[in-house]
């Protein structure tokens, strides 16, 4: 755990303590369970985003993909009668294909990630609305999928299974990001893509893989979101989710320039965001101010972090100057 | 001190430093250093990296304060200088890395922030006046370009002229040039040396810092040699020569180059062979070139002659527009640098910080990067394997760093270059391409890198060295290929080596 992560954890605990003191309902099992469910859903989404951001890219189409794939998932199992395990696989494959397409446009055709995924944001939302004829996708009355529902929206020992899913995914992705060869390549590319290329790394493939991972995790979270809401109106479902994901990564210490950030950071970022949402509800702050509170906190967080960075860089420079002088004398 | 030019000796110094001492915690950067600069005098300042040159520059620029000693500028004694004081008394710097706005024209750059304004509340720039003010400055530096040229369209030497014109515009009386020629090709260097002579003729003093000693030989009136923060010696005009300077700088003579010039080395079989290869920069100029096992092939030529582009094609970064490549007689298809690396063709690129290494990664992480799967078990990176490889290279190459976990960004240029070399040496090279391998590196580390290239060649590696440093090309290579406007204009064997021949081929004329 880095110092940054530790700082974020302390912030989460302090905010939590304050909210709990003002409104003890914060600590009620039902509230904690609801919040951790949302942390699970948004966490999976944010991890995907983090893999793209680490390469210096961005994925803006996440919210629209959640809407499109969520709609398709419900349609597959509720209307078309497809078996849900097959539907899950199909949705994950679709997510991978979307990621692959984005990665291909970005690495092979050299389009900017912002532009490609912005177009994706518009396209998938439009397709989702067209697919349902601007209606709502949902289950018919009495339609039940007990196992699927247990796995996605159910609880074990009072803890939402979506939260367990997040923990499993987080552990796997932590190993991938921080311990694997692929993870090292991601950091190297994010820091300096040219130098990585000159070291013989096939940077195009690595970046493409990052978008595929993002696509698959987004697809998975789309299934969770669909089973959580149980009915989807594609015009609004998942709106702004890309921004939640980006915000979680940024709060968690990721740089949009790439090459920086940790998996624990993005999880903690998600936790803080959901805590703030919860805070708005519990403290009786008008819910219309929801976004304003989030934006304000992110801005302050980034500002503090940046100032701290400037301070540390200055100190490092002084140290380096000293060491340089020492080295010079030694030569 | 002996002055050959008595008219200079007679005048009072513009700048004199007496007994200047500067310590940083635990070290003495300058130890009782004294020197003086007279009006119209060109001082060559040489010394290895870490000898105290940068500290001296910082003191003259007013960035750091000396502990003791006096600095007398134009008759006024100071304990230390401030940045404003330094500028105000007419000391101007031209740094190795130029500080120009490439998207603005020459005139705008020279008077940036000090533009003449037209009357009125809009504060519009008076362009006519500006041009009037710039014209004499450009004339003085002998510029062959106009004031409204975009800086991006100028050559490096021309950009340096703009910097010098900028210095003149603040009425500089002492211009300090810090490694101005390290990135200049041969012909452009001459222009810059002419500018220095013109400044001298106008009575402006120059301190010329360079690792290229033959340039110092050509322009300096006096050479000041720094070693370990002390004055190692001063050479008067008549005593300035290469060997004397090197002797004073390191207190010993260099042997590496002599070893390299042993004749009669039998060349091996052709390792890398290019047939009618064309680079995107010169699409209509096919290049044929053979690099043999066990030789160092020098690739000389002016900057922009297509040498770097050729290296990029050999390394798979850029696609050839035609022709074929062969490695040990077998056809070679390179779609990316990864393909080249897999074949044992490695490149030490020209721009170390941008493409050679990742400054934010540690030495160990940089060295393992091209061969990471070999340092991993089941796709998970093994730190101990990484460290072991890096430790080996650190020891072999003599990389000076506290540990292999040190960020490469904190290392000196020479040590960073050794990290770049280390990552390739850890992987059994077949063909090693080095693009300006010793640029900006001090003379001691240079000798080590020459030694390394020779050791590689002796071990049967084909070494291709691109260099703009004439002494280096002639001193290190077994054969020299010279490029001119995208084509090989000639290949010189050992007995044909001479500066004249290289230069003739570089400008497209036949060698003698």
Image: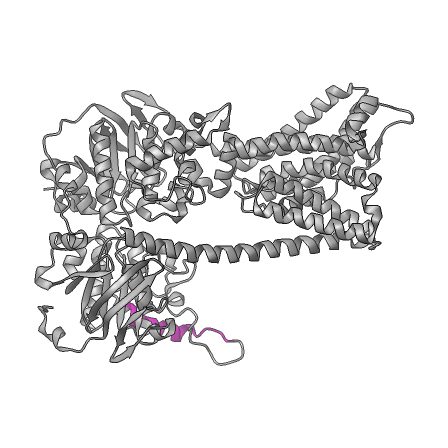
Quarter holding the C terminus of chain B is: top left
A285 drawn magenta:
no
B130 drawn magenta:
yes
Q: Looking at the image, is B400 positioned above or below residue B182?
A: above
Could you say where residue A125 lies in the image, as x and y percent from the top left? 73, 38
Could you say where residue B281 lies in the image, as x and y percent from the top left? 35, 41
Hey, which quadrant is residue B244 in on the image? bottom left
Hey, which quadrant is residue A66 in on the image? top right
Task: Identify which residue, A256 or A59, lies in the foreground.
Answer: A256
Q: Is residue B483 visible?
A: no
Quarter holding the N terminus of chain B is: bottom left
Chain part drawn in magenta: B123-138
Name the residue: 27% across, 56% down. Answer: B179
Q: Is residue B382 visible?
A: yes
Left or right of residue A205, residue A291 in this image: right
Q: Of all residues shown, which one is farthest toward the front? A: B26
Left or right of residue B16, residue A201 in this image: right
Task: Identify which residue, A233 or B388, lies in the foreground.
Answer: B388
Hey, which quadrant is residue B2 in on the image? bottom left
Magenta stretch, overall SS: helix
**Looking at the image, how many numbered discs can be counted on the residues?**
0
Could you say where residue A184 lies in the image, as x and y percent from the top left? 50, 35
* Colouring convention used in this rendered image of the protein: one colour
Q: Of all residues shown, which one is farthest toward the right? A: A141
Q: Looking at the image, is B288 positioned above or below residue A241?
A: above
Task: Identify which residue, B190 or A34, lies in the foreground.
Answer: A34
Could you say where residue A248 lies in the image, as x and y percent from the top left? 66, 44
Task: Identify which residue, B46 or B288, lies in the foreground.
Answer: B46
């Amino acid at each position: 755990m880095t110092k940054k992560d530790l700082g974020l954890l302390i912030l989460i605990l302090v905010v939590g303590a304050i909210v709990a003191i003002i409104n003890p309902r914060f600590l009620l099992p039902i509230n904690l369970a609801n919040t951790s469910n949302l942390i699970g859903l948004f966490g999976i989404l944010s991890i995907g985003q983090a893999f793209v951001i680490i390469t210096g890219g961005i994925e803006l189409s996440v919210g629209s993909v959640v809407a499109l794939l969520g709609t398709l998932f419900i349609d597959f199992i509720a209307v078309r009668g497809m078996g849900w395990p097959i539907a899950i696989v199909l949705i994950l494959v679709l997510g991978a294909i979307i990621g692959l397409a984005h990665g291909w446009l970005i690495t092979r055709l050299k389009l900017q990630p912002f532009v490609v995924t912005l177009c994706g944001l518009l396209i998938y939302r439009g397709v989702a609305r067209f697919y349902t004829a601007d209606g709502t996708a949902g289950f018919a009355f009495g339609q039940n999928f007990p196992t699927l529902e247990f796995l996605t929206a159910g609880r074990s020992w009072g803890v939402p299974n979506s939260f367990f899913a997040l923990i499993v995914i987080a552990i796997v992705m932590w190993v991938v990001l921080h311990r694997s060869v692929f993870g090292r390549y991601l950091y190297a590319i994010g820091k300096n893509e040219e130098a990585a290329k000159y070291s013989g790394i096939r940077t195009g493939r690595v970046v493409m893989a990052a978008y595929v991972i993002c696509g698959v995790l987004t697809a998975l979270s789309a299934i969770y979101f669909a089973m959580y809401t149980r009915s989807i109106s594609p015009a609004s479902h998942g709106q702004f989710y890309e921004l939640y994901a980006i915000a979680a990564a940024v709060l968690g210490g990721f740089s949009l320039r790439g090459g920086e950030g940790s998996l624990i950071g993005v999880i903690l970022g998600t936790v803080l965001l959901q805590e703030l949402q919860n805070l708005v509800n519990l403290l009786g702050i008008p819910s219309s101010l929801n976004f304003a509170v989030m934006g304000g906190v992110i801005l302050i967080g980034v500002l503090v972090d940046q100032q701290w960075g400037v301070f540390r860089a200055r100190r490092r420079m002084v140290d380096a100057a000293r060491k340089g002088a020492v080295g010079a004398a030694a030569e | 001190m002996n002055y050959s030019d008595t008219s200079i000796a007679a005048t009072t110094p513009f700048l004199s430093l007496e007994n200047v001492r500067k310590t940083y915690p635990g070290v003495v950067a300058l130890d009782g250093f004294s020197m003086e600069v007279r009006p119209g005098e060109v001082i060559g300042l040489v010394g290895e990296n870490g000898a105290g040159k940068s500290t001296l520059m910082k003191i003259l620029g007013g960035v750091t304060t000396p502990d003791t000693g006096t600095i007398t500028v134009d008759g006024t004694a100071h304990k230390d200088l401030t940045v404003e004081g330094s500028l105000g008394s007419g000391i101007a710097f031209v740094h190795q890395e130029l500080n120009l706005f490439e998207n603005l024209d020459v005139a705008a750059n020279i008077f940036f922030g000090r533009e003449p304004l037209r009357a009125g509340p809009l504060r519009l720039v008076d362009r006519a006046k500006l041009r009037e003010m710039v014209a004499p400055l450009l004339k003085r530096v002998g510029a062959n370009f106009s004031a409204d040229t975009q800086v991006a369209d100028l050559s490096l030497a021309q950009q340096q002229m703009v910097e010098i014109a900028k210095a003149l515009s603040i009425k500089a009386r002492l211009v300090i040039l810090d490694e101005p020629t390290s990135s200049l090709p041969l012909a452009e260097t001459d222009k810059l040396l002419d500018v220095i002579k013109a400044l001298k003729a106008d009575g402006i003093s120059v301190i010329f810092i360079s690792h290229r000693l033959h340039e110092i030989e050509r322009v300096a009136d006096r050479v000041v040699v720094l070693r370990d923060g002390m004055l190692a010696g001063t050479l008067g005009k008549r005593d300035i020569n290469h060997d004397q300077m090197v002797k004073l700088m390191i207190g010993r003579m260099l042997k590496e180059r002599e070893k390299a010039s042993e004749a009669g080395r039998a060349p091996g079989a052709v390792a890398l062979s290019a047939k009618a290869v064309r680079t995107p920069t010169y699409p209509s100029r096919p290049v044929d070139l053979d690099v043999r096992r066990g030789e160092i092939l020098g690739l000389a030529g002016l900057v922009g002659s297509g040498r770097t582009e050729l290296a990029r094609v050999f390394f798979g970064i850029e696609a050839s527009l035609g022709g074929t490549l062969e490695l040990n007689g077998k056809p070679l298809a390179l779609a990316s640098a990864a393909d080249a690396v897999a074949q044992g063709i490695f490149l030490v690129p020209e721009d170390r910080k941008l493409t050679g290494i990742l400054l934010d990664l540690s030495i160990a992480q940089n060295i393992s990067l091209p061969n990471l799967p070999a340092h991993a078990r089941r796709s998970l990176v093994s730190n101990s394997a990484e460290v072991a490889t890096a430790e080996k290279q650190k020891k072999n190459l003599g990389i000076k760093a506290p540990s292999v976990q040190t960020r490469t960004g904190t290392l000196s240029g020479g040590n960073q270059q050794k990290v770049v070399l280390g990552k390739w040496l850890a992987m059994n090279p077949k063909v090693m391409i080095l693009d300006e391998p010793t640029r900006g590196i001090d003379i001691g580390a240079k000798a080590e890198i020459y030694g390394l290239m020779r050791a590689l060649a002796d071990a049967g590696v084909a070494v291709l060295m691109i260099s703009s440093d004439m002494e280096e090309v002639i001193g290190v290579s077994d054969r020299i290929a010279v490029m001119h406007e995208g084509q090989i204009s000639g290949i010189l064997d050992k007995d044909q080596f001479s500066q004249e021949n290289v230069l003739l081929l570089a400008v497209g004329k036949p060698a003698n």
